[in-house]
Structures are given as structure tokens and as C-alpha cells.
Image (cartoon, rainbow, N blue to C red):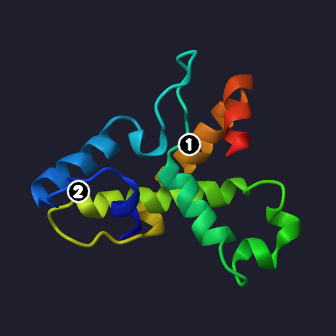
Amino acid sequence: MYVTQRYKWDPNNCREVNIAIAKDLLGDRGAFLRDGVDEQGHTNNLAHPTLSGLIIDFFYSGPSSVGQQFPEVFVTEVPRVMVAVSATALKVVLDEMASLQGEVAFRVAAYMPVYLEILGLMKKCDTSPTHTMKTRSL
């Protein structure tokens, strides 16, 4: 439900149209994680409002949230592993929405490569001052 509120789905909720939207988000090299480009034409990697919204809602909202329970870890920035886990979870949800089979199992064997690829993207972003600044501001 969360993903359907954050990504732009068919207003008539047509299953076939929503499947095509999910496939587009998945197919364009991680479009589900990006939020367009900035004024200089640099890609806004790991900046999609769905990703940041999921992180805020899940890790920081409520008195018993992980961010509240462990402020020493979460007060200055979201740990990289949490960003990667959140992005991987979004991929699972989109895979399920795009699948004609229904449920997709969130298994280590299937999604560890995705998780590692996202960590690699984060590391690559760290090599660019522009992207480092952007990802830290999230």
C-alpha cells in the first residue's frame, strides 16, 4: 500500500497499466531510486521521495522507532545498510507488483545481489563531491 501512495500509479487503478508502470520503474537502471536531475544535469541518485519517505516513516516515526531507540546511531545520518535495505525492499514490492505470479519471496539468495548493487551505487556516489553532498542531504 505504501508504494502505491508514493509512486504515480494509474488513477483508475488499472492492473495492466500499473504493471507497466512498475516495470518502467524497475527497467530503467533503478529509476525507482532516482528523482530526476538537478539544474546541472546530474542525476539525483537515491533521492526518490518514496525511498526517503519509507526511511523516515519506518526508522524515525513513532516513539518506539529504531531511530528513537538508538539515537546515537541514527541522529546524524541514516546508516548505509538501512538505506540499502529500504531500497531493496522497494525493489521487492515493485517486483511483486510487476509479477503476474503474485507474491515474490523476499529471500537472501534472490535479493542479496540487489542489496550489494545498491551498496555499490552508494560507494560510487561517494567518489563524486556532487553526489556525496546530495546523498548526505537526504
The residue sitting at the front extreme is 11
**Is residue 53 positioned above or below 20 on the image?**
below
Q: Image quadrant for the N terminus?
A: bottom left
The answer to which quarter of the image holds residue 129 is top right
Residue under the point 72% across and 57% down: 78
Measured as percent of width and height from the top left, residue 125 is found at: 65, 32
Q: Position of residue 39 (x, y in %)?
A: 56, 18
Q: Quadrant of residue 109?
A: bottom left
Q: Residue at x 53, y 44 (%)?
A: 117
Q: Using the image, tell me which numbered label, if any, was put on residue 2.
A: none
User: How many tags in the picture?
Assistant: 2
Residue 124, image x, y percentages: 64, 32
Measuring from the top left, give residue 58's x and y in whole percent: 59, 71
Q: Is residue 37 left or right of residue 32?
A: right
Helix or strand or loop: what does disc 2 sit on? helix
Count residues near mark 2 (Cα–Cα under 10 Å), then give few for <14, some for 14-19, many for 20+: many
- Name the amino acid, label 2: Ala
The tag on residue 98 is 2
Which residue type carries mark 1?
A: Leu
Which residue is at the front of the view, 13 or 135? 13
* Mark 1, secondary structure of its residue: loop
Q: Residue at x 72, y 75 (%)?
A: 66
**Disc 1 to disc 2, C-alpha distance:** 21 Å
Closer to the chain start, of discs 1 and 2, is 1
Dot 1 crowding, Cα within 10 Å, few <14, some 14–19, many 20+: many
Closer to the camera in the image, 92 or 75:
75
Please give the label number shown on residue 46: 1
